[in-house]
Amino acid sequence: MSQEHYTSTLTQQAGTYLPPLHGKASAWVCGNEEAEAIYMQALEKPEEFWEGRASQLLHWFKRWDKVLEADEERHKYRWFTGGKLNASFNCIDRHILIGRRNKAALIWQGEREMDVRCYTYQMLYTEVCRVAHALSSLRVRKGDRVALYMPMIPELVIAMLACARIGAIHTAIFSGYAEGGVRSRIQGAKAKIVITADAAVRAGKFKPLKANLDPILEKCPSVAHVVVVNHAELFDVKMMPNRDIWWHDLIEDFTLDVDFPCERMNSTDPLFLLHTSGSTGKPTGVLHSTGGYLTYAAHTTQWIFDMHDDDVHWCTADIGWITGHTYGVYGPLALGATVLMFEGVPTWPKPDRYWRIVEKFRVNILYTAPTVIRSLMRMGEAWAERYDLGTLRILGSVGEPISPEVWQWFYKNIGNSELPIVDTWWQTETGGAMIAPLPYATKLKPGSATKPLPGIDAAIMRDDSTPDLDGSADRRSGHLVIRKPWPGIMLGVYNDEEKYQSYFSRFGCYESGDGAEVDEDGYYWILGRIDDSINVSGHRLSTAEIEAVLVSCPEIAEAAVVPMPHALKGEAIYAYVVTRDEVAWSDTLRKKLLDTVRRDIGALASPEYIQFAEALPKTHSGKVIRRLLRKIAGGSSLEELGELTTVAHPEVIKPIIYGHQNILLGQHETASMEAEAAADGRG
Ligand code: PRX
């Protein structure tokens, strides 16, 4: 597809942007009329719609017997039952079989400018088969869990696809997680193998991974072997005999031309496990299916990004998160596109890094996060101006609401005031985007993720569990729910049925945990989490997990963690702590608490501020009233706190407000994490 077909100006009308008028003929969904027809078809005959997509987009070894088996009572949704397929086959072999073996599948830009690797589909096949053989020699079998604690290097994608080939379930752990975060995820998955690297390279520094893993593994008896990629060429990596193996030694024995036959997976077999923050201290292990997930990944990738197989697609999210799984690996590779993968951070060595990469590899689709855009915006547009960004055709945003101001900056300075921005709302549990525009059909409103995609039945529920259908005002607001199943819906929560059921218990359908408003045109405006999660730089963190770490310190009796607005991160973490009797409040203690959180969960969970308090506001039944703490952290005065009759001891509130004001005067700010936020904030 030539660029000229697409580069046409979005027309602005009263705060909305109409889709480009040219290029319709070549777009997957062309114009509003065609989109309306698709929405209608998906609404009237959902099963026909989804099976159409599954057969158009994927290769099935055996066709399904049933499109959807739904157990409405237990909220179990099984897609394409009886169908057989393999995700690795769909992402690699299929493209080779149709003559695309020499096409670039994966281009990797290392942190150092000179470090570039490119894998054609044939090369990817060879490496994935070798690693599948190697894992198989370590007795990895279908259904086994393989943990991937790796930096953004090609071996991560190769390992994922090798697991998929065998039918093993991969579970990626973001390399920014530290001890507790990694341990709970490996233990939760009962992983048999961990694949890691000697170190990650970040903003010119080495961050050891293998050394970090060693003490953790003492408490993970399920792990039989650790495979280590020699990435940073550290000299002092300790390898435990009989357990640890270098990646290069392991694959050396496997010759280049030996196929590893793909396991014929049931559509309903799990493809991967990925942990997200839960409402307790324990992360939630979200399990995704092979057939439903892959269909949904390929389907949304094709339509939201209008992806064609000659596109260079760059999803800047780390593969340790769901965005990297769906739009950095499975979706684009299933469609036979070229994926760009970048090891580094947007601002290092200079804030022009992203634009340099776009120009260098002629990137067509750039999918990133508001936190990244905010940090680059702050550095000024001059960094982008000196590069040729003319190959870009679609811009995307994910992870948190993008404010109209940031949207406009992205649109004007990166999109040259002519590219559609697809703001995509979704979650780890949904597998792929749920509310998002179709770039050549949907009118855009900056700040809104627009409308639910075809086949997605989103709704707004009131607190009393009734749908807010008409609403007395123009805008309806409440809990965002999804009423009908879709192929990307999670298969379950690993080893935690109760947690899975909790998503459905309140409204009888899938509860997202987000609040949203719908305007008079049916456009969705996401308001953020309603539960106790915090969205820091587009990363969902559990307040309970951070509180558990704080109270694990012997000095701390109680802790309450709430979000506070933050210019760069979107939301930052604000912690209130009550010390035990006799424990003095000090900056040393504050530092200790901060270090504990960093060591246990990772830098991304570090509180921006830690405030000591005599007591926390509680209800008469003893429940901490987070609503008040959240307001105080956001700067509300006593008068602005509203109704206080539910507070058991309202006298505790005033000192907390004073304490907060002192903190804002800069007396007690914890170490600034801005650079790290920018580095980690990749969706
Ligand atoms: O609050 C929403 C926010 O991110 C949450 C999901 O986090 P996670 O499972 O880590 O997945 C992130 C990437 C898909 C949601 O509940 N969120 C995600 N995308 C958007 C968003 N909020 C507003 N607008 C978005 N486009």
Image (tube, helix red, strand yellow):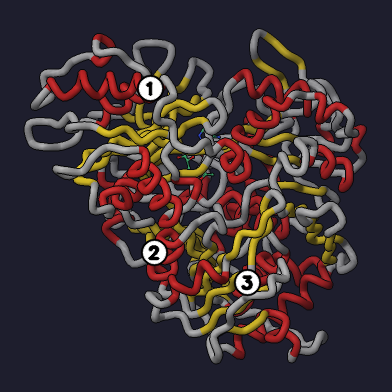
Question: Left or right: where does residue 373 sit relative to residue 41?
Answer: right
Residue marked by disc 2: 184
Tell me which label, 3 or 1, sits earlier in the chain. 3
Question: Residue 86, labelled with which disc?
Answer: 3
Q: Residue at x 37, y 25 (%)?
A: 663
Quarter of the image for residue 506 reads: top left
Q: Residue at x 78, y 24 (%)?
A: 381
Q: Nearer the viewer, mark 2 or mark 3?
A: 2
The answer to whether residue 604 of the structure is visible from this angle is: yes
Say which amino acid is labelled 3: Asn
> Where is residue 50 shown, x and y percent of the image?
57, 51
Tell me which label, 1 or 2, sits earlier in the chain. 2
- Determine the secondary structure under disc 2: helix
Q: Is residue 29 above or below residue 123?
A: above
Say which amino acid is labelled 2: Ser
Q: Nearer the viewer, mark 3 or mark 1?
A: 1
- Determine the secondary structure under disc 3: loop
